[in-house]
Amino acid sequence: MSLWRQLRHGVRTLLWRSRADGELDEEARHFAEEAAAAHEARGMGKEEARRMARLEMGSALQIREEVREAGWESGLTGFLDDLRYGARRLVRSPGFTAAGIITLALGIGATSALFAVVYTVLLRPLPYPHAERVVALVHTAPGANLKRLRMSPSLYFTYREESRVFDAVALWNGRRATVTGVGEAEQVPTLFVSHEFLDVLGVAPALGRGFRSGDDDGQSPRTAILSDGYWRQRFGGSPGVLGRRLVVESQPHEVIGVLPAGFDFLGEKAALLVPFRFRREQIRLIQFSEDGIARLKPGVTVKEANADVARCLLLAPRKFPMNAGFAANAFSDARISPTVRSLKDEAVGDVGGTLWLLMAGVGVLLAIACANVSNLALVRVEARRREFAVRAALGAGWGRMARDVMTECAVLGFMGGAAGLGLCAGVIRWLGPGSLFEPLPRAAEIGLDAWVVAFAMLLSMLCAMGVGLVPLWRASKDWTTEAVRGGGERMSASRERRTTQRGLLVMQLGLATVLLIASGLLLRTLAALRSVDAGFTAPQEVQAARVSIPVALVGSTEMVMRQQEAILRKFEALPGTTAAAIATSLPLEGANYDPVYVEGRDYGHDRLPPVRRMRRVSPGYMQALGGRLLAGRDLTWQDVYGFAPVALVSESMAREVWGEPVNGLGKRVRASLGEPWREVIGVVGDVRDDELTAAAPAMVYWPLGHRDAAGNASATRHVDYLVRSKRAGSVGYVKEMREALRSVNEHVPLANVRTLEEVRAKAMSTRALALVLLGVAGIMGLLLGVVGVYGVVAYSAGQRRREIAIRMAVGCTPRAVVQMFMREGLMAAAVGGALGLAAGIGAARAMRTLLFGVGTVDVGTLVVAWCVVAGAAGLASWAPASRAARTDPARALRG
């Protein structure tokens, strides 16, 4: 038969199966009649000839099956028949089916939802053409004790002009800019970029044009590009926006383009792209205040890029002059070296290890769920052992019955996977703004895409195989001889099945113990973090907000400072306010760096002094923060307006340099060789700045007003206000702050409103996320383990009902019966807990980077986890054990 005829015949058989069966039966009858006629021709009687023909040909059913097996469609038909048969059996067992689907749905749904996060954050390529060629230009400076050093304009021009490996290089910096002239004044997220920024990413505006080389020249007209969202929000999506004037930071900018919808850069939800205003002749060697990206030439590796950047770093001091007041060898003393890496790795940061750890934890939950359902399936196969024995005696092969068991598990797995996918979709919708996942990079992109669906379906099939293998292996050992076994053999097989069930139960309880240990360690970590002295008190009572005052809007440097003080006085006058201050940044949100010279220390003319953290603050900063003034006095507004040569230092710096905090008073420091010495007038308590797990850095606090090495006065225009009040965080209080600000300057908006407690919570967000996920997984795993204990003990009691009756008839007390069955559950908990403790110690070592204030072998956590598992197993055993103890011996023996 030709291939085409085989295909046509197979499709016809699948679509019109009853008709094909009728034709097969008719053909079989025709052959039987011909065979009978041939026997009659040889002298047999009519009935004898028909009987002989039937014996030779076999039954019509057998013929039909043999013919079917010859066609390709037979396998597909058999598979569909198995699916229908398995589905009917599951429908007839609603309890088992519901338990299996719910259990698998929990495991598959949780695992798939976390895979969606892992895939989006770690695996999915960035949404740019040839994104693997886009790299982040990052440096390190061990000579200045800086593990991470940003880009400077001097290095940007050096790489752009001297590099042999980059197609394009760009600078960028994300901050908020004040926009006026389009409705109410507001601060919007803005990316300040060099003109090649979009070229590096390979992105073209959807409307208008991109930046050109003249757009970031300090002498050219100012331009801006809008994001799609801001364009639609503020300009109604009108194409006529091109050419319009937008006032950004009090300067008019011409709108030249609109970005494509969905454009995103490292989570920076920028409303505007604005070019830097470079004047090459004014650029100095050291000004590491921006970030850099570049596009590699085709075929260039990151290793080659690092080697080429290292070569360019040697050329930078020849191309640009050293800053005034800096040591001549400051650049070389810093020992700057490149750490170029892919932009995706830069976006992910250090969160990758945490996500993979969480993925492993949720995978443990899935293993517990599979073990639970496998235990249920083992009981179900046990109930069908006589059926399998009869089928084996009638000639059914091992493969046919194995296919029967696995098909039923596949149907169950598919339904569990479908339910889990629905659960996954609900969880992903919950992962929106305000959720624990919000701080993760690319969190806004997390969604239910084709890869997540495929993963969930593959996972459901793997779970189905895992669920079916154990009962299949257990049943295959005795289903061919079950029908002829004696009682002793059947009891031996029953004991072996109970051993298998207990083994699965021990695995569930052991894995649940691991999850509980991980959750307990993270809980201890968060408790330790909350007890850390961060240098401030009652952070929930400190309302913070960003205010930017453009110099062009109010005039001179002194006028900027006076307006900042006027705003501060308005905030201080709000009902409930007890203190207020200004700072260039908040604790735990990072501070700038300055080289700090200490009078009396010999640095030499060519040496770089230690680089310290610095923050510019107003008088009353430590009071608003809830910090401590350890010695000396605070700053005053006279110090600020008079550009007084004074400073505050932190306790750690005073101890490092002068031995004791009080010894620092009267000493002098400065930020560069050209500046006048500043007297240390006060020593304040340490404040954590990087994260809560890191020691407080040595820090210098300069007044808001300052003069550079050339004597030019300047003010910090972008500042954070810290206002202490019991009403902090309330909608009404923030509204009053906005009104107070508007009364001083209606063109300046209140932006980035948050409390200091929110800042601290963000610093703990990664550990909080891990705790919540592993905690939920641990609780769910424990519940599944409890269900498993209950099921095993209840099944064991049901199987031994006759034994219980005999024991009670000869004098066994109900209490002894309860103890007998509770011993079974507690023994599983003891063994599983012991194995879980050993595995939990290994898991703790794997997650040591997340731990703080607690060791990887924390005896208290280990004991509590084991006690919780043992207590839960004891409670789960008690219910079926007490029911077994109420057995009526006479009634049970009669039955």
Image (cartoon, rainbow, N blue to C red):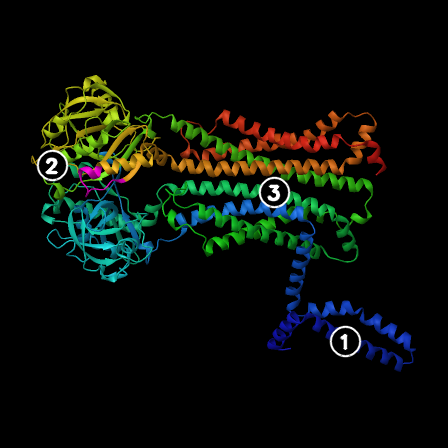
Instruction: Identify the element where label 3 is drawn.
Output: helix
Would you name the residue on which mark 2 appears?
559
Residue at 28% from the left image edge and 53% from the top image edge? 230
Q: Residues within 10 Å of mark 3 (few under 14, many from 20)?
A: many
Instruction: Identify the element where label 2 is drawn.
Output: helix
Quadrant (top left/top right/bottom left/bottom right) for the N terminus: bottom right
Q: Amino acid at mark 2?
A: Met
Q: Amino acid at mark 3?
A: Ala
Residue at 90% from the left image edge and 78% from the top image edge? 46
Instruction: Identify the element where label 1 is drawn.
Output: helix
Quadrant (top left/top right/bottom left/bottom right) for the C terminus: top right
261 shown above or below 606: below
Q: Magenta part of the protein: which range?
A: 741-751
**Does the image show residue 616?**
no
Q: Amino acid at mark 1?
A: Glu
Measure the alpha-carbon separation of dots 1 and 3.
50 Å
| Residue 107 picture quarter | top right
Residue at 24% from the left image edge and 53% from the top image edge? 197
Which residue, as the protein is rendered here, is positioned at the far bottom? 41
Ranked by sequence position, the earlier of labels 3 and 2 is 3
Ranked by sequence position, the earlier of labels 1 and 3 is 1
826 shown above or below 423: above
> x, y (%) of residue 19?
70, 73
137 horizontally vs 415: left or right:
left
In the image, 130 versus 327, the foreground residue is 130
105 shown above or below 739: below
Would you name the residue on which mark 3 appears?
371
> x, y (%) of residue 539?
33, 29
> x, y (%) of residue 602?
14, 26
Would you name the residue on which mark 1 appears?
26
